[in-house]
Amino acid sequence: MSFRNALITLTLVVFGLMAVYLVWRLVSVRRNPTTNDPENLTPFLDDDGLEGPRLERALGWSLIFVMIVALALPLYFLFEPSRQDDLAEHFDEQAVERGAILYANSESKEYDAAKSLLCANCHGVDGQGGQAPFVLQPELDICDVLENQGNPDVPECLPVQVVWTAPALDTVLLRFPEEEVFQILTWGRPGTPMPAWGVESGKGVLNTQSIDDLVAYLDSIQISKDDAQKRSTKEVIAFRLSAKENLEQQEIGVTTAKANLAKLRTDPKSTPAAIGEAEAEVASQEAIAASAKEWADQVADMGEGEVLFRLNCARCHTKGASYFDPNNLALPPPSPSGSGAFGPNLTGGSTLVQFPGGAGVQEQFDWVARGAPANEGYGIRGISSGRMPYFVNMLSEKQIKAIVAYERGL
Ligand code: HEC
Ligand code: HEC
């Protein structure tokens, strides 16, 4: 039992005893002797008795009680604020616990089959980022023709299965204020695998409190600004490396397919069908390797600013950046870098219009580094919707400058 509960119990017990005492005083026979005398003639203590030890005892008790009250009131006054803080903290802890359950998937220790919403499936168990399967619907005009739909002879009109990169959430509050994360959770990101979760959107089931709980949980897993910056720098190296490694792997795939074909050709038992299949495999591996090479060459040519843009900005400013995969030849051709998606088109010198001249460079830097609260202006005619993240916690000043320079050349 906590100290506070002990005090409450003690007070209740004291009230109880007082009630018993009162009842006892009212009904006790000894205290209410039955005589035939009228009340005012009932004998009682004489003056000496009343003003003697009896009076002192009554006064003594009063003094003790007054002292208790005199001590307790200031103590209450002193402890009450911290008690409120403790309560708020406890409340926050509970919110984090509830949020963790909502976030979990079966690999998390907080998993609860009835309550968990499996955010971890896409965003990673620890919020480090992950992947989400997604189906792209064809967009070409010829696919509006009924007979082209689902027709294997018109492959560009078949839906394409892609893997959509789901962003890390252990840095999301380094990039967005809590209110914006609340909005994202409520409304989702239409056109992406991120569902709307809030009742307010008409598509979700979560009330305000559950969304607050999720935000509280996300807040509890944020990494430090330093770690976030280190991660961003490592990602640049990993990005360059992965394009090279992928090319090497695809080239090995070609060699393997070719060796397989050569073996089949020398084997007298091979059927023409098996050889045909192996030839097709070589052709397909070669096509993938060619695409992987094109990508690796592109990456090798990219400057620092472009790679940083790819890793931090392209998912909102370049259509298809979240699911681009040089090995997936079924994908529609990639859109030009920065040509717009969820965020506006930045190409054709458009950022030079929004942030003109030498002063514009600094203004664009400030916008990318710190953003602007919703409904506030930026640049010449921009009005922030609050949806553009800020990067001052994620990237170094030098990195942001490199990105701005890259954008101004788009
Ligand atoms: C089916 C996969 C999937 C599930 C489930 C999912 N998300 Fe997402 N979420 C995504 C993807 C993909 C994005 C990025 C969309 C984009 O490209 O703009 C995203 C974006 C977000 C963002 C914005 C992050 C940013 O940096 O832009 C937040 C916050 C978020 N999700 C939180 C959650 C939470 C909390 C849950 C669980 C209640 C959840 N997500 C469930 C796939 C998912
Ligand atoms: C989560 C999506 C998202 C990401 C990631 C993102 N942006 Fe944006 N960006 C937006 C949106 C949305 C706008 C439109 C302004 C608004 O709604 O407040 C915008 C606007 C801009 C503008 C102003 C364009 C104009 O002409 O008004 C620039 C410049 C910009 N972003 C640069 C960047 C850079 C640089 C990065 C990466 C470091 C980045 N953005 C990452 C969503 C994003």
Image (spheres, helix red, strand yellow):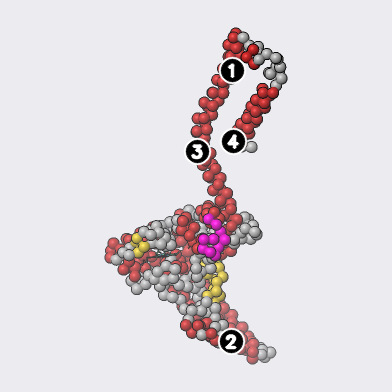
Q: Work out how far the residue at label 1 is from the one at label 4, CA to CA, in angstroms.
A: 30 Å
The tag earlier along the polypeptide, 3 or 2, is 3
Q: Quadrant of the C terminus?
A: bottom left
Q: Is mark 3 within 8 Å of ligand 1?
A: no
Amino acid on which the number 4 mark rests in the picture: Arg
The residue pinned by badge 1 equals 58
Q: Position of residue 99 (x, y in %)?
A: 57, 54
Look at mark 2 in the image and give the residue it sits on: 279
Kindly identify which residue carries mark 3.
81
Tell me the residue that label 4 is attached to.
4
Label 4 crowd (10 A; few <14 / some 14-19 / many >=20): few
Inter-mark Cα distance, 3 to 2: 78 Å
Q: Secondary structure at mark 4?
A: helix
Precedes in sequence: disc 4 or disc 2: 4
Residue located 65% across and 30% down the image: 16
Q: Amino acid at mark 1?
A: Ala
Quick check: is 339 in the magenta stretch? Answer: no
Q: Is residue 1 visible?
A: yes
Residue mark closest to the camera, 3 vs 2: 3
* SS at circle 3: helix
Q: Residue at x 62, y 9 (%)?
A: 46
Mark 1 to mark 3 CA distance (whole Å):
36 Å
Q: How far is the residue under mark 2 from the one under mark 1?
A: 111 Å
**Residue 406 image position (x, y, % from top left):** 37, 68
Ligand 1 within 8 angstroms of badge 4 C-beta = no
Residue stretch in magenta: 199-208
